[in-house]
Image: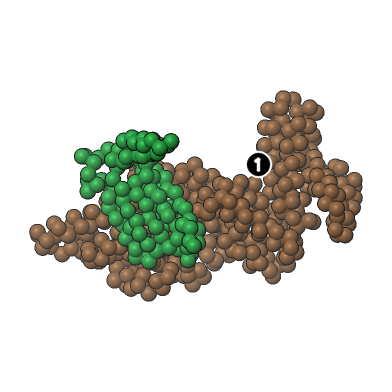
Chain colours: A green, B brown
Amino acid sequence: MMQFAIFNYVQPRDFADKRPENDPDGPAWGAYTKALIEAGVMVSGAALKPSHTATTLRIADGRRDLHDGPYAETKEQLGGFYIIDVPDVDAALAWAARNPAASTGAVEVRPIMQG
Amino acid sequence: MSHEAASKAAERIARLSYGKLVAMLAVRSRDIAGAEDALGEALLRAITDWSRFGVPANPEAWLVTVARRIDADRWRRAVAAADGAARWLLLEDERLATEDFEIPDDRLRLMLVCAHPALDPHLHTPLMLQAVLGIDARRIASAFLVSPATMGQRLSRAKARIAEAGIRFELPDRSDLPRRSDAVLAAIYAAYSLGWELAFIDAARSLDLVKEAIWLARLLIELEPGNSEAHALLALVMFAEARRAARRDPSTGGFVPLSEQDTSFWDLAMIAEAEHALRVAGELGTSGRFGFEAAIQAVHSARRLTGTTNWIAIEHLYRGLLLVSPTIGAHIGHAVSLAEVGSAVSALAHLDALPEELTSRHQPYWVARAHLLAIAGDIGGATQAYEKAIGLTEDVASRRFLMARKAQSEDLTSRNDQISAHPIAVVRKSE
């Protein structure tokens, strides 16, 4: 078995008051998470608050440089991630394809280093 | 002749004759990868050569000759192992002996090799798409949901195996041909199914794959006109493809299930071709998997004339299909048809009997299950099955459709609680 991280890159959504419980895609994420759990492949995961709540920090030449917002200003932003445990990369890609972000933004699948 | 015109001409030949030329080059050497490399280089040379001297009278022959020369040079340079030298001599002889020749069509041999039982069956379709149609590894990888690097490696390994295992490029004898052709049919069907699944994920690629499947099916018919299952497969693909435009709601872009499709969006020319192919298959005496599958689609297509779907016929045909090809898809289709002829309970019992390792991650199973539970009035069960189906769905249109269905069935229960009617009756009305 191998562990993979699946990063969900989502388009910033315009739904009323931006509260997660009002996201029309909320049930789709719930169903996907449940499918991962029921298949016994879920290790962990987290949903992140929108990218405008991020603070990015760099320290260069001993000076701190902070700015509001995400590290990279891209159209799709990291919205959360899953860690899954599956037999191989093909299985990881099959789960990535079912991720709701795959059809609206993008998902990145990365093997996790195992010592 | 301009450079551009020459590359257009080369491109056209590459598209039309790719598989034929690879087959021709690989038949003797059994080296598909080598044949593809040599042909690729010959096509590059064609662009420069043809822009200076014009397109030769027999461009295919020109390409084969040049590709052979390239292949021979490679062998000469590869400080030939003993057999390399012998092979080079053979190639040289051939080249000198045949400057003006008709190219035999070896594509059937190539198809049979790509679908050879000694190769991993998962690679039959990708190999055929690449070797016969010249589709690049990245596109194949995307269709099969495999990383492009991995797909490239798998294809090269399979080609190396063909060369090493000495898989012979010959037509099996009559007793063995049907069995071997079945693997080719299965590979073509897999290409079509992928195209079908991709319809809402990547419309352009979906269309490409389906077109390629149609192309391969027609080619197989041309090469094996007596193969009834090949005609039936073409019929199956055409019936389904005829409904492409009707699968989407023109105003919302949403998913429309077959039973609710507006038949005026169906492509009549494709249906006519499908019906013709099915007739030919019938005359040749088909009772194979694709014969049944095409017949089921023919019944669905008849709704455009009768306004109703003859579920009794469909249920019978699924029983026949299960005898010859008891796939999970056939079991699901049969269960749905059972519910339509009025026995939702036995339909559910059918689904229950399927082994869990086949069903637990099979999205269509959960869609069918949710639908049948809703009909049977088990709204709690339907909700759970819908949720499972939603979690396993890849495309956004189907996901939204299922979310709406789930909400619809829950909505009915809450209303049923108020009026305490029989949920079955209420659900039935909405179906």
Picture residue at 80% right of the left edge, 42% below the top = B66
Note whether residue B425 is visible. Answer: yes
Picture residue at 32% right of the left edge, 70% below the top = B348
Judge from the rendering whether residue B378 lies leftward or rightward of residue B229; answer left or right.
left
Type of residue at label 1? Arg
Give coordinates of residue A51: x percent, y percent: 32, 41
| Total numbered circles | 1
Query: Quadrant of the rendered structure where residue B125 is?
Result: bottom right
Give coordinates of residue B169: x percent, y percent: 74, 60
Picture residue at 27% right of the left edge, 50% below the top = A26
Query: Quadrant of the rendered structure where residue B57 is?
Result: top right
Q: Residue furthest top?
A: B2
Judge from the rendering whether residue B202 lies leftward or rightward of residue A66; answer left or right.
right
Give coordinates of residue B204: x percent, y percent: 49, 42
Q: Residue furthest front?
A: A62
Give coordinates of residue B375: x percent, y percent: 26, 63
Q: Is residue B136 above or below residue B392?
A: above
Judge from the rendering whether residue B418 lies leftward or rightward of residue A82; answer left or right.
left
Closer to us: B348 or B228: B348
- For label 1, the SS is helix
Closer to us: B293 or B249: B249
Q: Which residue is mark 1?
A: B15
Picture residue at 73% right of the left edge, 37% below the top = B44
Q: Is residue B192 above or below residue B63?
A: below
Q: Is residue A12 above or below residue B81?
A: above
Chain ID of residue with mark 1: B
Note whether residue B271 is visible. Answer: no
Query: Quadrant of the rendered structure where residue A55 is?
Result: top left
* Disc 1 crowd, CA 10 A, few/some/many (<14, 14-19, 20+): few
